[in-house]
Amino acid sequence: MIGPWHAHGHEAENGDAPLPTAAALGLLACPHCDAVWRDAADGEPCGRCGTRLYARKPYSLSRTWAFLIAACIMYIPANLLPVMITRTLFGAQYDTILSGVIYFWVSGAYGLAAIIFIASFLVPLFKLTVLILLALLAQRGSDWRRPERAKLYHIVEIIGRWSMLDVFVVSLLTGLVQIQGFAVIHAGVGIAAFGSVVVLTMLASLSFDPRLTWDGRAQQQAERERREQPSSDDREAKPA
């Protein structure tokens, strides 16, 4: 096993010269125990824990695109269908995400309106846009702003924990209002669509391999050829 490799030099720091990847150096890291192995073929078991080793996540882009397309489809009903249905003695009120934002804004609750708008509308849209951009550039093997793209992926992972805020708010209001007996609140179909968008974007983020950002077209072609080569079952991975 070896420690992290650091690039030195002015050109490497500025990104003017291509940096060698772990796959190009013949190194594979175990996704389970983090052991690093040298000259191990794709699909071989880790010598420490037995987990299959892969230089890149298998079918990463295919799975990412599948989840992203499904999330984009569900994003439309999530914003058009009601997420909360309030029934009182005076009738029923159907609220979508945007109508709720408008209601709180008109009522003077600017902070709450801003939080719901950001967490329930902008954050899912931002995640979808960023993941589509990352998947598209990775598929093309583009070298455009690779450090910034890597930072964008980490930002998506950080803000992902706040994506279910709207679902939590509706669940909390449903329980509280029904206990008080002033009205009856039910979750609408839109909240299920919104939850599907959140789950699908999370799965897309987990399926996307951020290491693809650093792979050029030549490296991707070499990786494809390497995966197509048959691996021998009796070959043992040698620790680096």
Image (tube, rainbow, N blue to C red):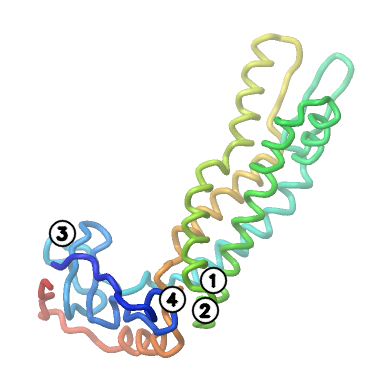
User: Which sits in the foreground, 240 or 85?
Assistant: 240
Are circles 2 and 1 on residues that touch, CB within 8 Å? Answer: yes
Residue 103, above or below 18: above
**Image-based side of 83 in relation to 106, left or right:** left
Q: Nearer the viewer, mark 1 or mark 4?
A: 4
Q: Which residue is mark 2?
A: 139
Q: Amino acid at mark 1?
A: Ala
Question: Label 1, label 4: how many angstroms apart (C-alpha)?
Answer: 24 Å
Q: Secondary structure at mark 4?
A: helix
Q: Which residue is mark 1?
A: 135
Are circles 3 and 2 on residues that touch, CB within 8 Å? Answer: no
Q: Amino acid at mark 2?
A: Gln
User: Which sits in the foreground, 181 or 145?
Assistant: 145
Question: Label 3, label 4: how many angstroms apart (C-alpha)?
Answer: 38 Å
**Image-based side of 235 in relation to 78, left or right:** left
Q: Residue at x 48, y 52 (%)?
A: 157
Indicate the position of residue 7 as horizontal and vertical percent values: 30, 74
Q: Which residue is mark 4?
A: 14
User: Which sits in the foreground, 13 or 138?
Assistant: 13
Q: Secondary structure at mark 3?
A: loop
Indicate the position of residue 140 as horizontal and vertical percent values: 54, 82
- Looking at the image, is mark 3 or mark 2 earlier in the sequence? 3
Q: Amino acid at mark 4?
A: Asn
- Looking at the image, is mark 1 or mark 4 earlier in the sequence? 4
Indicate the position of residue 104 as horizontal and vertical percent values: 79, 29
Q: Amino acid at mark 3?
A: Cys
Q: How many marks?
A: 4
Q: Which residue is mark 3?
A: 49
Question: Label 2, label 4: how many angstroms apart (C-alpha)?
Answer: 24 Å
Q: Nearer the viewer, mark 2 or mark 4?
A: 4
Say the numbered circle drawn on residue 117: none
